[in-house]
Image (tube, grey):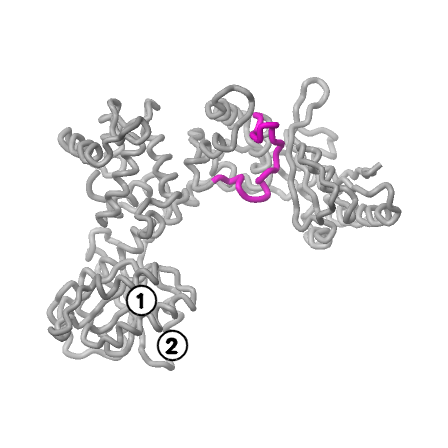
Amino acid sequence: MAKAATKAHPGVKSAVRIVVAGDRGTGKSSLIVTAVSETFPSSVPPVLPPTRMPDDFYPDRVPITIIDTSSKVEDAGKVAEELKRADAVVLTYACDRPETLDRLSTFWLPELRQIEVKVPVIVVGCKLDLRDENQQVSLEQVMSPIMQQFREIETCIECSAFKHIQIPEVFYYAQKAVLHPTGPLFDQESQTLKPRCVRALKRIFILCDLDRDGALSDAELNEFQVKCFNAPLQPSEIVGVKRVVEEKLPGGGANDMGVNDRGLTLTGFLFLHALFIEKGRLETTWTVLRKFGYNNDIKLSDELIPTFKLAPDQSAELTSEAVEYLRNIYELFESDGDNNLRPAELEDIFSTAPESPWDEPPYKDAAEKTALGGLSANAFLSEWALMSLLDPSKAVENLIYIGYSGDPSAAVRLTRRRRLDRKKQQSDRNVFHCFVFGPKKSGKSALVNSFIGRPFYDSYAPTAEEIYAVNVVDLPGGIKKTLVMREIPDDGVKKLLSNKESLASCDIAVFVYDSSDQSSWKRATELLVDVASHGEDTGYEVPCLIVAAKR
């Protein structure tokens, strides 16, 4: 695994903007001029105009613009605006003036947090040649406490514009922090790869493990190298890579071996990337991630995820091919054949996605659980149907993460508009959307919960936000359809109906009332009138059903 390629990939910045800030007289302008001209200036203006470095100045060949800033108090607002537009910030202090170093932690770094500048920071000690020889202290000793407190500091470096010491390195590190940031990949405190990075690398490993034997053979490793770095590995290099892994990960068991008789394991693959990062070779791991379409958030770049333009009363559903793929995935991970996908097995399915998409509402607990707390095949597919209905792009994105290799844009089909379905009084849709309305304490939640076997509670807890439940419904003739129930809190009806298209995605509206409470019936009928009137006014009329609860 050698040098990083310089070709741009999706999600890579096409230009870098570096803002230089710091106290008056710390050497900001001299640093910039010397970096660009390679000559120390005899005099500099108080603030330089924006300075462009040559595109070929550094190996990545990404244009760099350097912004000098004023140290005047009256210019603080302008400096703050420049800092907010930065891709990276260079903070300067003067090596011969300790008070300017103190100001980093008492003013500049807190100020960056205050104005919510969330970009890499490079701390630069200028005028190294002027430091008192009697005050020689190691940079690590000085900066370690500050870096512990301010994790946004990517690198610290000392330089001298007058003696041309480490001047190009300053902006190289700043550019590198933007193009190849440490933060998304590595936890400095625990010295481990971050979870999202591990999940992305696991997906890449699986994609490269063509024979699915859990290890990268020499041929697969070489193919990976060519794909990412446009250069093959020599046999001696492959031996060398495996030797390094074997020395560090001899492995006492099958799961912690870095190399086995079939090749480099996932454990070994992850170890190599942690090693690259520890040695400062972040560009290697970033090149791999970007070659497989990842952006700086360690998610697939937007251009790889199809978007779907739907009419308000259209739906998106997974195609039969995508559903079949998901059935196979279910069977592959549901190991003991009891139609019960355990939580750990579900987590394993999504272990190659940035995170499980079903850990948060509206997907969390939206499908029926088995007696053992897992998901049946129908419940698993129901969750996917819900995600396709609410956010088809997210559904397809997660299909890609878990290994779907078909055309992503063909994994979803757009249904006929509901208006036409009602006109023809027929529909070929497989997923139907039911809105559940009703006054407080009418039994809405109990109805929705019972649809997926959620437990019934005697005590009343008002519904604060919309709740979804999804399940498969059996129809005559062995036909199966998926029904999505969406509970609308009584307090949320006004907001819902303020949107002209709010009923466009609704197939049927259910109005629940407490049959033992006359005021509940009154409120339910008021809601029905409001919803029906809204449907007539907007052209999105829906059939309505009244349900008497608590009989």
Q: Which quadrant of the rendered structure holds the N terminus? A: top left
- Residues at discs 2 and 1 in contact (Cβ within 8 Å): no
Q: Is residue 14 left or right of residue 450?
A: left
Instruction: Name which residue lies at 65% across and 31% down.
Output: 471
Residue 258 is one of the magenta-drawn residues: no
Looking at the picture, tell me which residue is in the foreground, 185 or 249.
249
Give whichever of discs 2 and 1 has the lower sequence position.
1
- Residue reaching furthest front? 252
In the rendered image, the vertical position of residue 151 relative to residue 191, given as above or below: below
Q: Position of residue 125 (x, y in %)?
A: 21, 68
Residue 54 occupies quadrant: bottom left
In the rendered image, the vertical position of residue 454 relative to residue 63, given as above or below: above
Q: Position of residue 375 (x, y in %)?
A: 57, 29
The kind of residue on which mark 2 rests is Ala
**Residue highlighted by disc 1:** 19
Q: Secondary structure at mark 1?
A: strand
Q: Which residues are magenta?
A: 356-377
In the rendered image, the vertical position of residue 45 relative to residue 32, given as above or below: below
Looking at the picture, tell me which residue is in the foreground, 88 or 270.
270
**Residue highlighted by disc 2:** 76
Q: Residues within 10 Å of mark 2 (few under 14, many from 20)?
A: few
Could you tell me if residue 375 is visible in this image?
yes
Could you tell me if residue 536 is visible in this image?
no
